[in-house]
Image: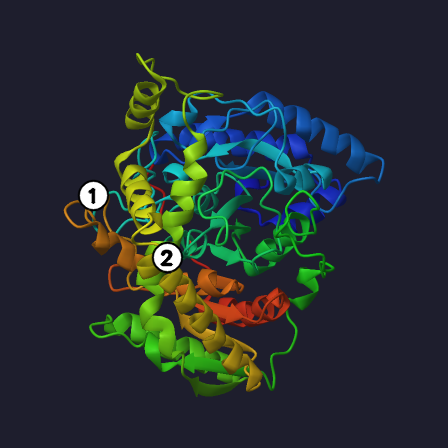
């Protein structure tokens, strides 16, 4: 019998088309894997009945030759995406048992193309976190462990449930969102492939908002090809989202295996940080050498405003969060803590409903937007953001096709190891990823090696706006050179 859970989306798609197995068999195998892996805490809601119904429907369509591009493929959905009739909480107590009466645009497109929903995946509360430890459902465990150790490691955040589930073979792919690295960093920590598309490429409609000018949906898959297949279904213009860009969605899969000969790859000197681990430096050099061997040309580039990206991001993102989260007041939906006045009800509801990290960011955001500080903080951060974007534009204007950087400053760390006393320690994990969100560019994280303790490490490729195709072509080169890694099963 085929080990259904170890198939890639591309392999499963071919097997379904050839009638080698059914979507129901594929779905049942993944539902059993989810049941056996509850120790990972990757899923916050399992939907087995819905999954089997969707699988039967997909099998019927495949039988008639009417199956869509994702017909019968079982996926996990980050709990930030509204799913009609299925609880959606953003992993926050404040949304309580909220059940949307509508479907997010991204998930509706996946169902349109025949995908099957296995359930909702854990994430940091309101996507605020770099380790998936702020969820009201508890932390997610990374399926990877250090060699010879039983310590639970974080899978990265905020899309930790998505990355953990894909790496542990619980679903064939997953939706995720990226505001400052929340797709690429978990992908790097789990040896999966995650792409944050260009801002405006995927609709934000029906996704719980964190920072509206930074949030972007994207996929996490087992391979570069799987991520390309998923993105094609997720992307597209949506008139319901005013930031959605009306531009055709190419066949991303066609970019896989394309020659990268003659492409110029920028190596930014500003990403060589003081105290950067030698294994990250070595991995970066290896990645550059692989691209060079495939015919690409390496050029040193400068992104001078990179050093201001993290502080500017941690002003812009909390400011937008404080504005977006004002709607959670206990009046219309979700949690309500009664009070003697409306003010008391607001205070009680938010104190009980929001976790510590969300409260911290809302307070920072409210402060930087307040009358006396708006110009000093928020306005200046937006000006810095413009300069960061111009850095990239200048690079691309010189003929650079993509930029190669490390994805994270380290491999996965232990649950509870960082950010306890000093939240800035946790924020520093986003050092290589936030520039991409600030500039609205596409970025992909591809597994590229392991550290001395046997944990996965990844490289990041940053592309021009709406040029995800190039990232898939280059990402495939790295994937082929590095090989694929899977964690040893312990759960």
Instruction: For the C terminus, give its image quadrant.
Output: top left
Q: Quadrant of residue 68?
A: top right
Please state the horizontal and vertical placement of residue 454, each as a whole percent of the image.
29, 59
How many marks the image carries: the answer is: 2
58 vs 266: above or below: above
**Going by the image, does 83 lie left or right of 249?**
left
Colouring style: rainbow
Rendered residue at 67%/42% (across/down): 240
Q: Earlier in the sequence, mark 2 or mark 1?
A: 2
Examine the rendering and report whether any part of residue 456 can be seen.
no
Residue 99, quarter of the rendered image: top right
Q: Which residue is mark 2?
A: 378
Q: Above or below — where is 109 with respect to 327? A: below
Residue 188 visible in the picture: yes
Q: Quadrant of residue 401?
A: bottom right
Q: Residue furthest right?
A: 64
Circle 2 SS class = helix
Question: In the drawing, does residue 408 fall left or right of residue 59?
Answer: left
| Label placed on residue 278 | none
Q: Position of residue 293 (x, y in %)?
A: 51, 84
- Disc 2 crowd, CA 10 A, few/some/many (<14, 14-19, 20+): many
Residue 399, how many percent across, how many down? 57, 85
Q: Which mark is residue 416?
A: 1
Percent from the top left, x then y, of residue 155? 35, 47
Q: Give the CA distance from mark 2 to mark 1.
A: 31 Å
Location of the N terminus by quadrant is top right
- Residue at 48% x, 43% y is 169
Is residue 466 positioned above or below 94 on the image? below
Left or right relative to 93: residue 116: right
Q: In this rendering, is residue 428 above or below 326? A: below
Q: Are marks 2 and 1 in contact (CB under 8 Å)?
A: no
Residue at figure coordinates x 42%, y 47% from the top left: 320
């Amino acid at each position: 019998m085929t080990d259904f859970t170890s198939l890639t989306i591309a392999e499963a798609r071919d097997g379904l088309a050839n009638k080698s197995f059914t979507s129901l068999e594929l779905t049942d195998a993944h539902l059993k894997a989810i049941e056996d892996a509850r120790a990972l805490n990757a899923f916050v809601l399992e939907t087995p009945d819905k999954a089997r119904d969707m699988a039967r429907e997909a099998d019927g369509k495949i039988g008639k030759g009417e199956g869509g591009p994702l017909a019968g493929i079982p996926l996990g959905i980050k709990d930030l995406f509204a799913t009609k009739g299925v609880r959606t909480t953003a992993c926050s107590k404040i949304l309580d048992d909220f059940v949307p009466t509508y479907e997010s645009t991204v998930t509706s497109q996946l169902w349109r193309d025949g995908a099957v929903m296995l359930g909702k995946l854990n994430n940091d509360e309101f996507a605020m976190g770099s380790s998936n430890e702020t969820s009201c459902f508890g932390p997610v465990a990374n399926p990877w462990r250090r060699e010879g150790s039983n310590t639970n490691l974080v899978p990265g955040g905020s899309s930790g449930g998505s990355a953990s589930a894909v790496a542990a073979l619980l679903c064939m792919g997953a939706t995720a969102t990226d505001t400052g690295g929340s797709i690429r960093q978990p992908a790097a920590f789990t040896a999966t492939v995650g792409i944050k598309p260009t801002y405006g490429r995927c609709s934000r409609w029906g996704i719980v908002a964190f920072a509206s000018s930074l949030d972007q949906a994207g996929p996490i898959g087992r391979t570069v090809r799987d991520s390309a297949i998923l993105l094609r279904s997720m992307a597209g213009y949506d008139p319901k989202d005013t930031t959605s860009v009306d531009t055709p969605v190419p066949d991303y899969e066609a970019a896989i295996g394309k020659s990268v000969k003659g492409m110029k790859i920028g190596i930014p000197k500003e990403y060589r940080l003081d105290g950067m681990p030698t294994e990250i430096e070595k991995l970066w050099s290896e990645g550059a050498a692989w691209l060079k061997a495939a015919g690409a040309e390496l050029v040193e580039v400068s992104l001078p405003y990179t050093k201001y990206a993290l502080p500017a991001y941690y002003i812009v993102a909390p400011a937008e969060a404080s504005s977006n989260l004002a709607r959670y007041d206990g009046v219309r939906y979700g949690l309500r803590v009664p009070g003697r006045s409306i003010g008391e009800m607001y205070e009680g509801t938010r104190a009980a409903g929001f976790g510590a990290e969300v409260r911290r960011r809302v307070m920072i955001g409210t402060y930087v937007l307040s009358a006396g500080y708006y110009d000093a903080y928020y306005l200046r951060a937006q000006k810095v953001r413009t300069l960061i974007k111009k850095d990239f534009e200048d690079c691309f204007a010189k003929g650079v096709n993509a930029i190669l950087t490390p994805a994270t400053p380290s491999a996965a760390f232990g649950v509870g190891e960082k950010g306890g006393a000093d939240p800035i320690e946790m924020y520093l994990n986003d050092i290589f990823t936030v520039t991409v969100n600030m500039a609205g560019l596409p970025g992909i994280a591809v597994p590229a090696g392991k550290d001395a303790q046997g944990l996965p490490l990844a490289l990041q490729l940053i592309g021009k706006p709406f040029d995800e195709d190039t990232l898939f072509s280059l990402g495939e080169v790295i994937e082929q050179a590095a090989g694929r890694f899977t964690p040893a099963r312990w759960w």
